[in-house]
Image: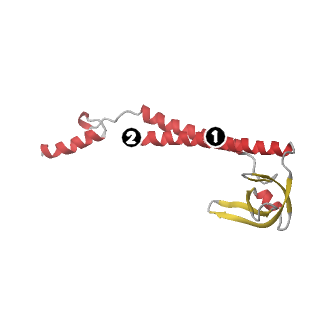
Amino acid sequence: MRFILIIPGIAAVIFGLVMFVRIGDDERRLAAKVQTVKAGQIQPEVLIVIEKYVNSSRHGSGWSHVVFRSSRQARVNCNTTREFYDSVSLSNTVTGYYFPDGYYIYGSIGQGAGTAKWIFLGFGLMTGTGLLAVALTSRKSMMPNGMTGDMGSLLTAIRNRGKRE
């Protein structure tokens, strides 16, 4: 029983820590882009909205996408917030800033990643340490005739059963 709880416990802790670090890195990259834009190091480009669609989801409204055309690329597909999606129409122009990993468009990226990273960390640590605590503090249950509840004792009891009869 301990092994069954230890593996998911360790996995939950690792998952929480990895998500915390990944979301934190994404926040730092976005902050660096915003700082670069505010410093005037990147020139704005005009993006024209050529398509809008929502990837449907079984669990809600889905992911909103807006497709742009720019002077650099024929199609720039951006996953956006629902508010941004609703605020633009086909043929509208939007100001964007080109970076090697994609365009930064003010207002198209949702806020609240700081909260999400703490939720992932808290969930992973609480679930993982809870499972590990149960696994490490539980004692082997005693079975009749003084046998312990491990697999070896069970197999021995099954082998010896035929000898007693």
- Checking the image for residue 76, the label placed there is none
In the rendered image of this protein, does residue 106 appear above or below residue 131?
A: below
Q: Nearer the viewer, residue 29 or 12?
A: 29
In the rendered image of this protein, does residue 7 appear above or below residue 94?
A: above
Neighbourhood count class around disc 1 (C-alpha, 10 Å): few under 14, some 14–19, many 20 upward: few
Q: Quadrant of residue 65?
A: bottom right
- Residue 143 x %, y %: 28, 37
- Residue 84 x %, y %: 80, 57
Q: Nearer the viewer, residue 22 or 113?
A: 22
Identify the residue at horizontal 80%, vertical 53% (top origin): 105
- Residue 45 x %, y %: 85, 56
The figure's colour scheme reads secondary structure
**Judging from the image, what secondary structure is the residue with disc 2 in?**
loop
Quadrant in which the N terminus is drawn: top left
Question: Which badge, 2 or 1, comes first in the chain's sequence?
Answer: 2
- Checking the image for residue 1, the label placed there is 2
In the rendered image of this protein, does residue 107 appear above or below residue 50?
A: above
Q: Nearer the viewer, residue 28 or 99?
A: 99
Identify the residue at horizontal 44%, vertical 41% (top origin): 5
**Judging from the image, what secondary structure is the residue with disc 1 in?**
helix
Question: Label 1 is placed on what type of residue?
Answer: Val
- Residue 117 x %, y %: 66, 42
Q: Nearer the viewer, residue 48 or 40?
A: 40
**Which residue in the structure is indicated by mark 1?**
21
Question: Label 2 is placed on what type of residue?
Answer: Met
